[in-house]
Amino acid sequence: MLEELRQELAALHRELVLNGLVVWTGGNISARDPSTNRVVIKPSGVRYDDLTADKLVIVDLDGRVLEGELKPSSDTATHLYIYRHRQDVGGIVHTHSTFATAFAAVGKPIPAVLTAVCDEFGGPIPVGGFAPIGGEEIGQEIVKSIGDSKAILMQNHGVFTIGEDATSAVKSAVMVEDAARTIHHALQLGEPIPISPEDIARLNRRYREEYGQQ
C-alpha cells in the first residue's frame, strides 16, 4: 500500500539525520496521499538506522492502522488533527533540532532578521503554547497559532513544519534550524537589525514567484 510514498518517506527521514535535526529515535515525518487521504508515518521509537520503507505505518485520518506491524508515532494524533483541519497540508515534520528548540524553550519566536527567513516563512516563526504530548492538543495549538507560516515552535517542546508535501515540510525544517543557529549567534554579537514588514513581504513574494526554475 502506497509503496512509492513509503520509499520517499524513508529517504526523507534519512535527510533529518544528515541535516542534524534529530537524535536517537526523536522526531518524525508523515505524508498524506492526496488520492486516498491515507497517511504514512514513522513508527514509534524506531532508530533511524533501522527505519526502512516496510516499517512505516499507514493510518486513516481517524487513526486506524491500515497497514504496518509497528505502533505508529506518539505524535500521530497531532499529525492527523492538522491534516483534518488543513486541506492544503500534505506533509508534516516534527523535530527537536537544537537551536530552534532553544527558542521554543524560552517561548520566543524566531525573528525575521534574515532574508532567508523572509523568503521561506514570510515573517517571524511563531511560538505555540505548551500542550501535552499524545493527544490532539498539540495539533489544535498548531492549527490555532501557525497562521500563514510553514513552521511553528511549540513551547518547551520543539519544531513542527508543514508543506504541500513531505519534501516541502522537510525543507522548511532544515531552514528553521539553519536560521535559528545563525540568529542565535547574531544575538551573542548584539541586537539583530530588523527588516521592515514591506521588505519582508517583498522578499517572500519574490521567492515564491521568481526564485528557482519556474
Image: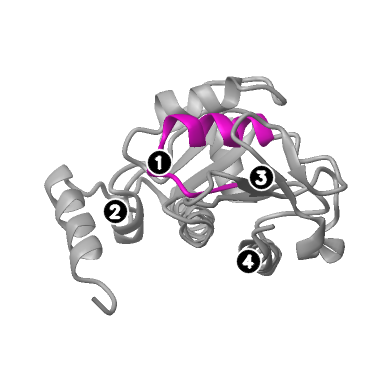
Image quarter of residue 170:
bottom right
Q: CB of mark 3 within 8 Å of CB of mark 2?
A: no
- Residue topped by disc 4: 19
Task: Estimate the spatial distance between the alpha carbons at disc 2 and disc 4, rounded to whole Å.
Answer: 21 Å
Task: Estimate the spatial distance between the alpha carbons at disc 3 and disc 2, rounded to whole Å.
Answer: 22 Å
- Residue topped by disc 2: 118
Q: Secondary structure at mark 2?
A: helix
Residue at (76, 54) in percent of width and height: 56
Identify residue type, mark 4: Asn
Task: Estimate the spatial distance between the alpha carbons at disc 1 and disc 2, rounded to whole Å.
Answer: 10 Å
Residue at (51, 62) in percent of width and height: 167
Q: CB of mark 1 within 8 Å of CB of mark 2?
A: no
Mark 4, Cα crowd under 10 Å, few <14 / some 14-19 / many 20+, is: few
Q: Is residue 212 above or below residue 163?
A: below
Image quadrant occupied by the C terminus: bottom left
- Residue topped by disc 1: 125
Q: CB of mark 3 within 8 Å of CB of mark 4?
A: no
**Name of the residue lying farthest toward the bottom:** 213
